[in-house]
Image (tube, rainbow, N blue to C red):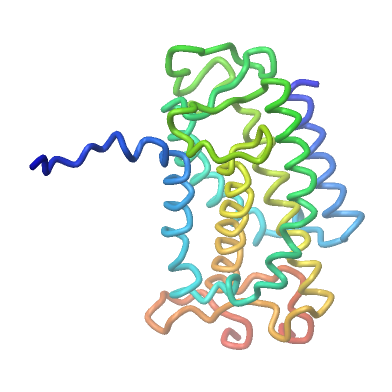
Amino acid sequence: MTYTQIGLMAVIVAVLVDLFVLRTALVKRKLFWMSYAIIVFFQFITNGVLTGSMIVRYSGDAIIGGDYPETTPPLIGDGRLFFAPIEDLLFGFPMILLVLSVWVWLGRRGLDRLPYSGPPPKWWPKGGWFGTTK
Amino acid sequence: MPLSLDLAVLEPFAYIGVLVFVLVVTLPLQLVLKARVYSKPLRLVISLIPMLVLFLIWDFYAIDRGHWFFDEDRVTGLTIGILPIEELLFFITVPIASLLTFEAVRSIKGWSAGDEGKAKS
């Protein structure tokens, strides 16, 4: 199997786990998508460093894009997004969703007396926290 | 006496340096925004296990098949079989950073993750 195929499979598995196995349904929550948007922004930066500087390289046989054995891959284009193969999104997303889903599932099971986080410091702009808003 | 610092000695720590960077820049999420992740070590470790099993299998397979490979000059050279130790550390640091982000957003926005129980009425 190629990286592309395994990645698609991993996304499907992680979403199924979230929706039907652990029933955390994070993919239906804005908390998850806001967090993922921030995470993926930093993924582009750190992964861009690792792939743009060719610390990590990829076989053209495994990804949509081509081989770049000696030269830096394109910033954007030929299946690359910020130097990294777009398949890396199919790696990062299920990895994060799976961890967050188990994390929330454990919170539901009552592993922590206080499962949630916060509050932010008083000087932090208003945004609310359980018990402090409304 | 030569006083010049040869930065080349840092080269093997390039990949691991990126991971250290990830941990350092996300630390304020725990300390300032009170994203309680490090303070829940048991929950943290259990949360990582299913992902670690699946993604380590994937990583071993992908490295074995040559899907991706690493610049030997910029990893430490410590390995578990064919797996650079950096990859294992990646699977620990990046999820921790992600959990910190998730909990920091929850701390700031007060949005529900569904595990608040009676705390959120």
Left or right for A98, reference B108: right
Q: Position of residue B24 (x, y in %)?
A: 42, 59
Q: Residue at x 69, y 71 (%)?
A: B112
Residue A47's place in the image compared with B27, above or below, is above
For the residue pair A4 and B81, the one nearer the viewer reads as B81
Q: Position of residue B85 (x, y in %)?
A: 58, 43
Residue A80: image quadrant is top right
Residue reaching furthest to the left: B1
Left or right for B59, reference B99: right
Residue B56: image quadrant is top right
Q: Position of residue B91 (x, y in %)?
A: 63, 49
Q: Residue at x 78, y 29 (%)?
A: A6
Residue A110's place in the image compared with A56, above or below, is below
Q: Residue at x 60, y 86 (%)?
A: A134
Q: Quadrant of the N terminus of chain B?
A: top left
Q: Position of residue A133 (x, y in %)?
A: 58, 84
For the residue pair A66 and B17, the one nearer the viewer reads as B17
Q: Quadrant of the C terminus of chain B?
A: bottom right
